[in-house]
Amino acid sequence: MKSGSLGSYIVRRLLQTIPVILGVVVVNFLLLQLAPGDLATVLAGEAGGAPKEYIDQLRARFGHDQPVYVQLFNYIKNLLVLDLGYSFRQSAPVLELLLMRLGPTLLLMGSTLVVSLGLGVLMGLLAALWVRTWKDHVISVAAVIVYATPLFWVGLMLVLVFSIWLDWFPTSGMENVVAFHEGWNRVVDIAHHLVLPTITLSLFYLALYARLMRASMLEQRGLDYVTTARAKGQTDRKITTRHVFRNALLPVVTMAGVQTGGLLGGSVVVEAIFAWPGLGQLAYQSLFARDYNLLLGIFFMSAVLVVIVNLIVDVIYVFLDPRIRIG
Amino acid sequence: MNRRIVLALALATTALSSLPAMAQKSGGTLVQITQPEPPNLAPYISTSAPIGQVTAKVFDGLLEYGFDLKPKPSLAESFEVAPDGKAITFKLRKDVKFHDGKPFTSADVQFTIMEVLKKNHPRGIATFRDVTAVETPDAHTAILRLAIPAPYILKALSSYESPMLPKHVYGQGDIKTHANANTPIGSGPFKFGEWRRGEFVRLDKNPSYWRAGLPYLDRIVVRFIADASTRTAVLEKGEAHVAGLGAVPYNDAKKLALRPNIEVSTKGTEMISPIVELLFNTKQAPFDNPKVRQAISYAVDRKFVIENVWFGFGKPAMGIISSNFQPSGLFAPGIDFTVADRIERANKLLDEAGFPRKADGTRFEFTHDITPYGEEWQRFGETVQQNLAQIGVKATLRYEDLPKWLKRTYTDYDFAITSNFLFNLADPVLGVHRGVHSDRIRPGTVFVNGSRWSSPETDALMDKAAVETNDATRGKLYAEFVQRVSEASPVAYILEVQFPTVINKQFKNVIDTPLGIYGNFATVHRQ
């Protein structure tokens, strides 16, 4: 594989995503129009009542007095120059709000991805190696239980046990707001706060990846190429690490790419429990406030994230399995 | 461990740097929980509940209030109402500086009231409607000129309701999308420090606050935690110290009160006076009949609702005006709907109204909409449903999200009965009139007269009470008004909620105004 072809592949893929993302934006825009009630009434409702003049004034300011197609056209026009609009409810530009939340979200997503993929693959691998022994059963049953447990319950129990009873970790938040650490202390403090949310969010995906990895390993082991390798006199250990493991990893990596969207959604719950300042919380709040500018911005950013992660997954394929060609 | 050392250091340094003779210890960080996160920090264009919990510490008002709702000096040292009630003269303090170092003058008062609150504040538009001008004869005198007397204005000048803004900051650019909407600059005891969205707002001590020696605290951090169980856990563990106005579920507040390090106070809603009510659609059968409405009001078991839905944090409402107005003489009870034979009375009223029981024991059915403010409202709806079943009325519950519910209730009037949450606020003119006055029947405007009931007599009583400057005379007008409203019962007033404020005992003096957590916390100190 030449690096030049990989580069042009990535560029081509990125260009292909533009209509996809535009489509997502248009569909979301139209769907949001179907929701009853608007930002002006919510703002007035939060204010505990307001005169009609005030509400009319708000509507005019938001541009909600214009026809829908005009609003859509304006939105897309602005989007093309990355102007995501202004959140009237939060009194700040949408892009600024999103970028503020992007860091914590990527941190939580990243650590979750590493923990769940790493441990999930390891568990699945071990279960497959110990197939039909008691160790395999323990791993498989544990995976099913974790998979079936609701996220919010796991989160609350972790807070109860590790935070309130044992006092090992803080209950919530991203850093200690009384101390306000700086430098390395701050990094340590954030890592300390990251532990419980990451475990909570990882458990579900860990179970998923472990089961998938186990099944995939077992399937690969029964294939012809393994028999061939064995006939060539390869050791079991080499067959597993060189051949079976790499091939078995492909479906898991695919699944991890597909699950990024789900990870964003699942993080709403975890962010709520641990007061983690990510995008999920923001999406939830803005939906209930009918803050469409902000919500569309979040959809846009999520779509971009998912597309990028899937592109990365496709590139990883090539390294895992040289038979897969790009293009 | 770490935190304790930092706090000890902070204490030591403040003790060294300032040595005024005071009994209270300076220093410390108070962590307050506010739920939900405020959308912005612009209390001059939005009265969204969480905003004021933060900004009342950053801005000052012209006045403050005691628990009897009587005004106390703040930015205004004194005020004088003209004999005809058409002018109010404020003498302003001369030593007040905004957080950017510029002095506070009468021009700021003029700008705030005329240019900002009267034009943009959701309630200010109504409160300051009759203010024709604010005159500034000198830098420290401001005269409000009124078209007609408006005594209630004197109740609406707290830092929460009418924050005084620096003209040289907020006068620049469009006030509605102002650059300082999220970085407020005021003259209050705390300066805005930082807002990390989704996490916290940090407020730092204003070292040149005009009240010498105050505030005691070095810092207030307002945290935002979306999950109710986590909020309770954080308070239990002492990671946060104050939470109020529904931030802690009522049953959790009860549990937390049992812990040795926590106290739960129900003071601090005297100027808010929230009332839980059932709103009838009086333009639609069967609730166009006052007898039916009275019957429903009798049927609701207020004591049960208070004990089991609001976990004891309330008392039965006696009418449209909250009993919090008792000290100011404006309170009067209406018909007593909590009498022992209320079920018999309700049944009798329904028989008289022409809704006899059918063969299956029911009289009629309707859909009961529920205020989408959280779980207790659902429990309330279920209780009402059971109460009404006793008198043969079948209710089906409907729960929607806030925008949908607001539209249904206040724009489309597409409801039969809905629960509702209306605040009496600091004066009946501000909080009570809107619920039943004919000039407040305005489709599309929320939290006004949604029952669409009114009568010329009650309108006249309200109009008179609004311009009357003598409290005793106002009290008499309101007594008659309350009676008439309860006879018509366009709304069933169920209970006055007394919001629990959960306070960590290491902090004292947290609730020292009738605005509770909307206070400025200047005198809060560590034990």
Image (cartoon, coloured by chain):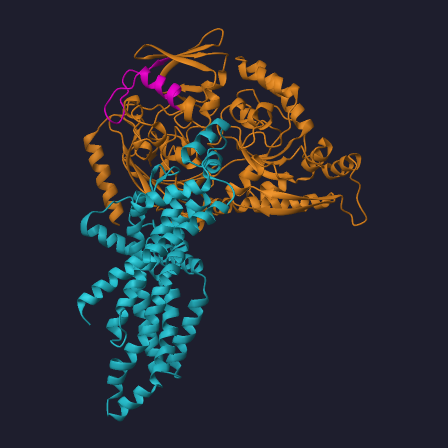
Chain colours: A cyan, B orange
> In which quadrant of the rendered view does residue A292 lie?
top left
Question: Could you tell whether B420 is left or right of A320 in the image?
Answer: right
Q: Which of B444 and B329 lies nearest the eye of the viewer?
A: B444
User: Does any portion of residue B200 appear in the rendered image?
Assistant: yes
Residue at the right extreme? B359
Of the pair A131 and B506, the residue shown nearer to us: A131
In the rendered view, does B114 fall on the left or right side of B439? left
B92 inside magenta stretch: yes
| Residue for point 61% across, 44% down | B381
Furthest toward the top, the residue is B83
> Which portion, as a residue range, is magenta?
B90-116
Is residue B334 located in the magenta-colored stretch of the structure? no
Residue in view at x 54 percent, y 14 percent: B467
* Residue A44 picture location, percent across and down: 47, 34
Q: Is A51 situated above or below A35?
A: above
B400 over B211 or under it: above or below: below
Image location (x, y in percent) of residue B242: 39, 40
Label total for image: 0
Residue A223 position by quadrant:
bottom left
Q: Quadrant of the C terminus of chain B?
A: top left
Residue B351, position in %: x, y? 79, 37
Camera-side residue of B311 and A216: A216
- Residue at 71%, 31% in the rendered image: B290
Q: Residue at x 36, y 52 (%)?
A: A22
